[in-house]
Amino acid sequence: MRRICGAALMAGLLAASPPVVACAAAQPGVKGSAADMNARATRFADRPPIAFGTAWYPEHWPEERWEKDLAWMEKANFNTVRIAEFAWSTMEPREGEFDFEWLDRAIAAASRHGMMVVLGTPSAAPPAWMTQRYPDVLRVDEDGVRATHGGRRHFSFASERYRMFARRIAEKMAERYGDNPNVVGWQIDNEIGPPSFGPEAEERWHSFLEQRYGTIDTLNERWATEYWSQHYNNFGQIPLRATGQHNPGLLLDFKHFTTATWTDYVQNQLDAIRAHADPRQFVTTNTMFWNAGFDHYELHERLDLASWDNYIQDADPDWIANGANHDLVRGYKQRNFWLMETQAGRVDWVPINRALAPGQVREMGWQAVQHGADAILYWEFRAARNGQETYYGTVLGQDGTPAPIFNEIAKLGGELREAMPALADTEPVYRMAMLFDYDSRWALDLQRLHEDFDPIREFTDFYRPFRLGSQGVAVLPVDAELSAYPLVVAPALNVVTASDAERLEAYVRGGGHLVLGPRSGMKDDANALWPQRQPGPLEPLLGAQVEQFYALDQPVKLTGAFGAGEAAIWAEWLSPEAEDVEVLARYDDPAGWLDKKPAILSRPVGRGRITYVGAWLQPDMMRRLAEKLMADEGIGPILSTDSDDVEIGARSGAGKTVLIAINHGDEPQPLRSPVGAERIAGTVTNGALPAHGVAVFRVDRDMLSTSKGATH
Ligand code: GLA
């Protein structure tokens, strides 16, 4: 029997295999369940299960105005504000001189209007008194140039002095607000990421490498430094600013180094907050989904919550890709997350800053909730009269009256309020999992071999048909507990360690179906080739190897038991070794080196199976393969739909299930409402979901378990 998380288990709406509800409490390294998270509150012991609100910068406005702005927030159905994240020069106008009285009043005013408060530490914006007196706190870029004052994120993540200042302001805030009953949580910094390359960073780099490898000989051996005479005599010789073509081992370790340095940077403020804050206040940092700067799994280990900032640059959301973004973030802690920022219409940093169409802001809000967001906060509330972002989309205009988007946001807020009792203590329903691994992503990006081999695009191309077919895909790190998932897909697990291989083998032998995509099992965690052919340490499990790989300048055709199609960008010639390896697809003839060679292999092992997909399949073929793999594992949709524009997903827990249907398209689409379900938000008109429409249903567990196939 595969392990399924006990209390959270519910049966599927279809006869297919039972869905897996996110097993937050059961995951290693996770401190509590979503229910525990909801208990984290002070005055808000009964706090709304979904936070809905905005970034508010009271320091931008005369105090007389605050009441009016907060009244508008109430009208928008907001219940949460995030304050202070860039207000360092207002909180500490001169070195060591603190002024928090305005913040006391802002928090009190917000709470009079029923707002929960999240406080941001201001370390993304060091004040001028500091950068002028202590220029060593400033960031140094890859060319050795120090940042100047006037923007933000101009600090060095390695500067001891900067960390001291950041810790002190975080500590002062925590001393003052750590037991404030209106403060529900903390956000450290803002969108951390750009590393610094100054002397302090260099020193940390050398000690990081020494800690990682112990001796310089080990490092030389793991990086194979005989190549081009790179041999190092001591750690102090190793360059930090490794621009141009450099050793892949060094380049991957640089990513490990930035991960360690950012984690430590965040920890510095986390310790200051934790020393004074009520443990029921959460601590998070807002991140940028696929940002390549650091390993987000590692950074989130000690934080209570993952939160992220979701912006649709061209205002033309690719709903499946955006769903993958949410799933990725939820996987950081395998727990519901906060959408700490999202756009109230348009952004201001792309060539054409188009606004989201009417209905799309609401649609994106429901999508976030469907994928496990327990908060939606808009950026930003009111257009600042000056500053770098005056043209951003906002909820109120600069004159303090509602922008056209206001009503749509207020409508979503009203719907969420109605749906909150149903959404409380629920988590997304997953029917399968995909693995996303930072080392693999970095290793591939560092040596793409085909300029279009973008590992995020490749991940998303795999994700697409699985999301459509299963309506619930967990995105997990490679060391996650996988036994709850009948199907686990790793689209390009380039870096595989011996212990990863052991865990994956145990998953397969225990009854799971592991699917590996092209370029899997090539490298170890020093970015060196495994001495055996791909998939390296997984070769014995697969009973086959990759004979050779080919970057493609034009698509190749292939044919399998599930039909014919094409692969582009990348194709591998697979070679079965064990007798029980099944060839699921072969390249057609003529395909040069690939003529008639196996392209997809599968092998039963123990109680499970391993499948290797050696090519980047084009969408049609990928979809057919995904459908076959899901059918083999008994995975079907939660609620069937005829249109790829319609997104279905569910959250479940505490004896109830909330089903969220979203039409992301421009035409109405038929929707078969689940039998006996209560519609708690949105509209279905003549059996159709309107264009950009949403319908939310509540069903109870009993109904689900007896509704085999009864989806209409
Ligand atoms: C980020 C920042 C915000 C704001 C938005 C605008 O998400 O966190 O302060 O600058 O970008 O896109």
Image (cartoon, rainbow, N blue to C red):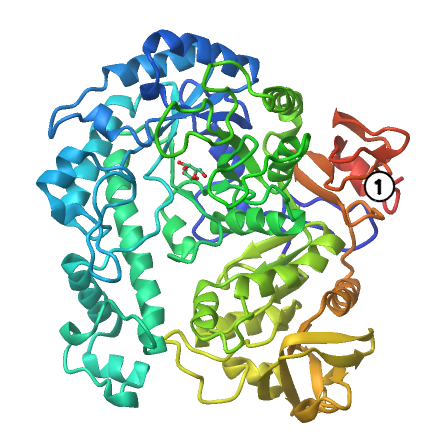
Viewer-proximal residue, 169 or 505?
A: 169
- Where does the image place residue 135, in percent across and percent down from the top left? 12, 46
- Where does the image place residue 174, in percent across and percent down from the top left? 26, 28
- Where does the image place residue 222, in percent across and percent down from the top left? 31, 81
Q: Is residue 218 visible?
A: yes
Q: Quadrant of the N terminus?
A: bottom right
Viewer-proximal residue, 266 or 316?
A: 316
Quadrant in the picture for residue 10:
top right
Which residue is drawn at the image coordinates 23% and 19% (left, top)?
100
Q: Is residue 483 visible?
A: no
Q: Does 403 sit left or right of 87 as displayed?
A: right
Which residue is drawn at the image coordinates 66% and 34% (left, top)?
357
Disc 1 target residue: 706
Q: Residues within 10 Å of mark 1 (few under 14, many from 20)?
A: some
Residue 58 drawn above or below residue 530: above
Which residue is drawn at the image coordinates 33% and 58% (left, top)?
259
